[in-house]
Amino acid sequence: MGTRTCYYESMPWFGMDIGGSLAKLVYFEPADFNLEDEDTELEPEALYKIHHYLRCNTAYGSTGIRDVHLEVRQVTVLGHRGSLHFIRFPTTSMSRFLDMVKEKRLSSLADTIHATGGGAYKFERDFKEIVNMSLQKHDELSCLLRGIHFMDRILPNECYYYRNTDAFNSEDSERVPYDFRDPYPYLAVNIGSGVSILAVYSQDNFKRVGGTSLGGGTFLGLCCLLTGCETFEEAIELASQGDSTKVDKSVRDIYGRDYNRFGLPGSVVASSFCSMSIKEKRDAASKKDLARATLVTITNNIGSIARMTALNEGIERIVFVGNFLRVNPISMKLLSYAMDFWSKGSLKALFLQHEGYFGAVGAFLELIGYDGDRNGNGAVCNGVV
């Protein structure tokens, strides 16, 4: 009984990544916590409420979502078997999250939350004043990389690439697992509200080598202006049904054919949104077309910067991560095609199943004191931490 009491006093375990657009939370649910057990002497009421609320819901309020398809089961953390859950909500809903924390009395169980991202600084005072909790801040990019390698170790098919991609017809493309156990060196292209690009040579040897302000936040902001949509999911759904060729101007539109001297196919975009300078084409373009053109424009820009950075650094593997890729196979396949075509097969675009959650995973690892990825202690085997 003493062991159980000590165990529950240390719960709950989670890490946060508070980004510019989305806040992400990774939460460990122990299997040896019985939600049906009413013995509150062993399971404090506040802890019971938190476990029950997080585990028994897939939506929290109007904006919080638990990505059930990303749940990882049968993970052992510090001797306790359980599941990892992945939860997200817009950063603009932080006040509602804090209300939930206050209502569930999380501060009666812990006085510190391990967090990363810009919001760990921006909202530090709010956490202290509203729920009397401190934020233990961790470096954003270090957490990102720790999270990537940890998830790849516990999930053999975490990393993958697309084969047989085409710029305009990707129906036949095939998703193929990629062995990422010996990845160095590689570029990590983190696409959130903006984009940061890291050259990674080992777990602790990396540097930021580039980026762009034109990221997922840009795509959503422009789509909201151009189409009246409200959410990222709406914007992606519109884009999936649109035709960007009605908005952009291609090489063929200018030359009437391919530009063979420089190996430019006629289908390549020569100027994004250029056709919108013509009234007849503006009138003919639908909201779906505008959303698709916006997605293609942002994706092509990210791909171009990533490719040039890879050439400058002499690196052939590029890992694209971040919430911009969530429910967004269009961009992933465009990036795959672009890397393969423009590098004549020398560059490979890689993707990861848990896309935008790696920073939160890294913060979670800091909470539990996991250092297996640095010195060999606490090595992962069949999901054991």
Image: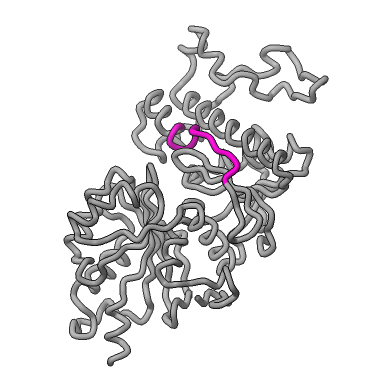
Residue occupying the point 56% across, 19% down: 246
Residue occupying the point 42% across, 27% down: 222
Q: Is residue 195 above or below residue 79?
A: above
* Position in image of residue 28 (x %, y %): 39, 69
The residue lying furthest to the top in this view is: 279
Residue occupying the point 47% across, 61% down: 362
The magenta segment is 208-218
* Position in image of residue 244 (x %, y %): 56, 25
For residue 114, side relative to residue 186 (left or right) = left
Q: Quadrant of residue 137?
A: bottom left
Q: Nearer the viewer, residue 378 or 168?
A: 378
For residue 258, side relative to residue 209 (left or right) = right
Q: Nearer the viewer, residue 113 or 243?
A: 113
Q: Quadrant of residue 336?
A: top right
Q: Is residue 332 magenta?
A: no
Residue occupying the point 51% across, 10% down: 277
- Image quarter (top left, top right, bottom left or bottom right) of the N terminus: bottom left
The residue lying furthest to the bottom in this view is: 1
